Structure formats: structure tokens, C-alpha cells
Image (cartoon, helix red, strand yellow):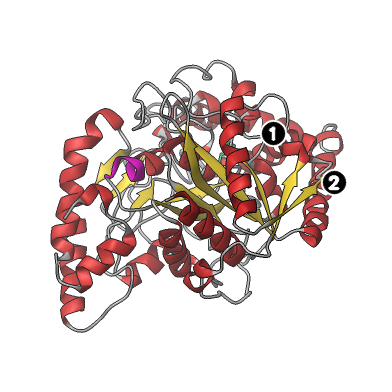
């Protein structure tokens, strides 16, 4: 068993053939974490005992005749998703020591499929950031170059998959947090359409934008995980009753006859020319494989980053109000008054970036500024959505870069939050539009850093995304 190269698919095959048991597979992952995670720091916590118990149960279930693609497969989980009996810190001092009393719906679904939860991955505090440098606990390094960031906020999940210390992982994406770290680390990341996957039990950052999704080594693995995660949930009223199709069946479709749109607003000055070379090559390869290339305009793209950072921070300021040392979270040791209790608990519990966003979000919602900022941002969001609706009348998917650069050096962007925000330019529109989006590796820079290609599809168009992603992946091997 070569743990490093195993995918969900090949591991499932090994389990089916009895080449190894889930206990052996899980032990292999635990050993890999122990041997390799030291310098990478992808994991915040590892639950060896719990994982081996789950693995033994999966082996017993298989012996009793049960089978499915996730039975006995270890999956790494971002530390923002509640898993019963495990910590869920959101990489914040605010939630240090908290142990979840229940499963998020996504965790419950993986659990009932027989998946194994070996460890919890590092992230930017409360998913706010693009480099995982905002974690209160650890600095995760990019496995391709330890001096560089893994991206964020799901940087731990991406780094674990890329390092081979996880077969696959779950991340969350509010403005790019699955796709951008997948791009920086060279793995596949899928942000499902808003409403496709339940958010119940996932600590909320910005509720109208958040989605959970798979981070994997292959597009097929992403399809397998999405199949298990997707679907309506009585605990989350924003999940959609739209039927869940057979995602794996979509993988064989190919590119012939598909219309691929290139939005001109995503092919602009400022993107690293080396990144562009790989994106252009990917587009050429798709055209050669029979796709028709269509020029598209999404005229309101220039407002997307500003709109995102108004709406996301506004929602965050409301969502994070519950962490006050009384209802949830860290409580200060010796408060002098009730006000002091709230103020000190929050001052001690939250990190700088989270505080910045709470202040920003409170400001854009405050009377006198609400109409000028939050109200206008909502109107602009509608225009951005309409741009996509119009675009998908002319094409099946859009191809763009995931990020303007490959992974940058640790520390390079930490003292300039605006610079960091601007790096989200290509990923935030999909969240504002409720679309689905996939990041697939499309090349390496001269410094041996991965570059990701973004495939955008209409809401609930995951089958089309997976079809294009899988076809492109086949072209590359
Ligand atoms: N980088 C973006 C932000 O900091 C997106 C984060 C995310 O998707 N959770 O808000």
C-alpha cells in the first residue's frame, strides 16, 4: 500500500479486494501524519483512537456484506465542521478546548457511509483569510515549498491532501477557501452551488455565501464525496430540493460540442504571466479536444471584491456575536462588570483579522451607513448574479484562473490585508452568484509551484463542472 498516492477510488478498490483493511489503511494515514506533518503542520488534532475504532467498525461492516465508495476511507475534516466528540476550534482561541456534542450534517452523512475521521485540519481563524496564516495555533506550510503558504482558508485540508497525509478532505468556501488552497497546493477543490450541501453544524462565517465541499486528488474523488454530501437537509432551510444527480456518471462526457466561455474581465493585467501561460494552454487543450470557445463579458466583475468584503463582513459581524463568553466561547478570568466580561472575552478570544472584519461588518450595517454600503452591495450582488445568468445562456461553463498568483512566501501579505483581499478577485464572484466552481491543477511554475484552473458552472450545474474537469484531467495525463 503506497499511502501517498492512494485516492478514495484506489483505496476503495484495495478494500474491496481485501488487499488491505480499513484498520491498516487508517493506521497508514496516522503513520504518514506522524512522519510527515511535522514541518507542514496541516493538522490541528489527530484522533488516532477514534479513527481506528471507526475503521474496525467499517471492516466489520464490510465482512457483513456492506459496501460503498466511502466505507472505511479516512477523510480529513477542516476544523470548522462539528464532528461529535472531536474538538472544533475554528483555529481560534475563542473555541480552544471546545468539543462538539453533535455531528454537522456533512459529518453525519460521511459517518453513515462508514468514512473514518482521522484528523482535523488547520485553517484561517473562522475561515477569514487566504493563506492560513490567521490560525491562532499553527502556521501551515505548502508541501511544494515549505517557505510558502498553502493558501486559505482551508489550507490545512489542501496541504494534507497534497502531502499525502490525507486521501481527501473537506473544506469550506465562502469566497474561495476551497479553490484557492487547492490551486496553491495542486489538488482538486469543488465549491458546490449554494444550497447543494447542508451548512448545519458548520460554524457560520457568512451564511449567504458559505458552502462545504471536497478537496481531493482527482475529479472522480470529488464526485464521490459530493455524492455523499449533497442533498436537502431538514436542519438547513437553505438546502435545495433539486434532485441530486449521479455525479460519477457525468465524468465520461468529454468536451466535444461543449461551449466554454472566457470572461474577458478575468483575463486582465495584474495576473502573473506565468499563471496565464498555463491557463491559456489549458484553454487551447480544451479547444483541441473539441470544445467551442466563446468570448463572454461579465461587466460587473470589478465590483465583486468590494461587494464580497461588505456582505461577508456584515454577515460575520452578526454570526460572531454569539461568541461572547456567555453563550459560546472563551470567558475572561476576572471580569469587573458585565460589560467588561463581554469586552475582555472577545478581546482575548478573537485574533486581529477577525476583529477587523467584525468592526468592518458592524460599520457597514450601522445606521447612517447601511444604505450606502450594505444596501448598495446587495444591489451590486444582484447585478453580478445577472451577469452570470446571461453568460450561461451563451456557454456551458466558464474557464478562468483561480488566483492571480501561485503560492506566495509566508509573511509576504500578512501586513497588507487589502493586498490579501484583492487576491480573491477570481473566486468571490461564484459565491456571490450562488454558482458551483471547481479548481483543477493545470501546470507548474518554474519554481515548481502548482497553478489551478477554475471551471465555473451555473447553480446546480455540478455535473457539467465534473464532466469538464474530468475531461481536462484526462488530457493532462
Ligand atoms: N479569502 C476570503 C476571505 O478571507 C475567502 C475565505 C473563505 O472562503 N472562507 O473572506
SS of the residue at dot 1?
A: helix
Residue segment shown in magenta: 160-164
Residue 221 shows in this picture: yes
- In the picture of the structure, the residue carrying the numbered disc 1 is 362
Is disc 1's CB within 8 Å of ligand 1?
no
Circle nearer the viewer, 1 or 2? 2
Is residue 392 rendered magenta in the image?
A: no
Q: Is residue 229 left or right of residue 432?
A: left
The picture quadrant where one finds residue 289 is: bottom right
Q: Residue at x 40, y 54 (%)?
A: 82
SS of the residue at dot 2?
A: helix
Task: Look at the picture and state if 375 lies above or below 291.
Answer: above
Q: Residue at x 54, y 15 (%)?
A: 415
* Residue 367 x, y percent position in the rendering: 82, 35
Q: Residue at x 65, y 37 (%)?
A: 313
Q: Are marks 1 and 2 in contact (CB under 8 Å)?
A: no
- In the picture of the structure, the residue carrying the numbered disc 2 is 379
Residue 145, label in figure? none
* Residue 75 x, y percent position in the rendering: 32, 56
* Residue 397 x, y percent position in the rendering: 68, 56
Amino acid at each position: 500500500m503506497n499511502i501517498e498516492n492512494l485516492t478514495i477510488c484506489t483505496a476503495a478498490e484495495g478494500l474491496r479486494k481485501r488487499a488491505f483493511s480499513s484498520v491498516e489503511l487508517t493506521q497508514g494515514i496516522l503513520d504518514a501524519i506522524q512522519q510527515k506533518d511535522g514541518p507542514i503542520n496541516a493538522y490541528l488534532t489527530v484522533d488516532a483512537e477514534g479513527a481506528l475504532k471507526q475503521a474496525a467498525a467499517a471492516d466489520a461492516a464490510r465482512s457483513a456484506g456492506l459496501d460503498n465508495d466511502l466505507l472505511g476511507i479516512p477523510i480529513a475534516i477542516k476544523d470548522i465542521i462539528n464532528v461529535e466528540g472531536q474538538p472544533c476550534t475554528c483555529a481560534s482561541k475563542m473555541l480552544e478546548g471546545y468539543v462538539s456534542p453533535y455531528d454537522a450534517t456533512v459529518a453525519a452523512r460521511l459517518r453513515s457511509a462508514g468514512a473514518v475521521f482521522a484528523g482535523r485540519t488547520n485553517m484561517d481563524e473562522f475561515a477569514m483569510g487566504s493563506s492560513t496564516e490567521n490560525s491562532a495555533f499553527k502556521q501551515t506550510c505548502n508541501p511544494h515549498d515549505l517557505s510558502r503558504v498553502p493558501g486559505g482558508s482551508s489550507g490545512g485540508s489542501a496541504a494534507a491532501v497534497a502531502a499525502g497525509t490525507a486521501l481527501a478532505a473537506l473544506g469550506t468556501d465562502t469566497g474561495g477557501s476551497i479553490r484557492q488552497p487547492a490551486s496553491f497546493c495542486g489538488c482538486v477543490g469543488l465549491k458546490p452551488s449554494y444550497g447543494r450541501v447542508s451548512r448545519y453544524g458548520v460554524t457560520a462565517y457568512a451564511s449567504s455565501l458559505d458552502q462545504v465541499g471536497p478537496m481531493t486528488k482527482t475529479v472522480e474523488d470529488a464526485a464521490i464525496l459530493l455524492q455523499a454530501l449533497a442533498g436537502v437537509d431538514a436542519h438547513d432551510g437553505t438546502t435545495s430540493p433539486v434532485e441530486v444527480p449521479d455525479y460519477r456518471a457525468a465524468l465520461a462526457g468529454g468536451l466535444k460540442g461543449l461551449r466554454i466561455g472566457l470572461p474577458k474581465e478575468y483575463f486582465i493585467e495584474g495576473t502573473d504571466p506565468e499563471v496565464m501561460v498555463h491557463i491559456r494552454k489549458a484553454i487551447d487543450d480544451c479547444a483541441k479536444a473539441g470544445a467551442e470557445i466563446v468570448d463572454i463579458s461579465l461587466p460587473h466583475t470589478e465590483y465583486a471584491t468590494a461587494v464580497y468584503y461588505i456582505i461577508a463582513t456584515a454577515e460575520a459581524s452578526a454570526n460572531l456575536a454569539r461568541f461572547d463568553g456567555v453563550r459560546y466561547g472563551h470567558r475572561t478570568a476576572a471580569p469587573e462588570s458585565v460589560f467588561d466580561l463581554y469586552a475582555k472575552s472577545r478581546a482575548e478570544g478573537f485574533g486581529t483579522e477577525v476583529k477587523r472584519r467584525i468592526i468592518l461588518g458592524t460599520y457597514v450595517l450601522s445606521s447612517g451607513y447601511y444604505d450606502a454600503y450594505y444596501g448598495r452591495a446587495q444591489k451590486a450582488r444582484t447585478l453580478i448574479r445577472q451577469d452570470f445568468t446571461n453568460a450561461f445562456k451563451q456557454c456551458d461553463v466558464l474557464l478562468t484562473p483561480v488566483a492571480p498568483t501561485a503560492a506566495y512566501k509566508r509573511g509576504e501579505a500578512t501586513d497588507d490585508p487589502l493586498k490579501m483581499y484583492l487576491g480573491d478577485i477570481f473566486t468571490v464572484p461564484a459565491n456571490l452568484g450562488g454558482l458551483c466552481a471547481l479548481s483543477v491543477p493545470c501546470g507548474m511554475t518554474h519554481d515548481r509551484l502548482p497553478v489551478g484552473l477554475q471551471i465555473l458552472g451555473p447553480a446546480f450545474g455540478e455535473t457539467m463542472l465534473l464532466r469538464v474537469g474530468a475531461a481536462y484531467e484526462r488530457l493532462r495525463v
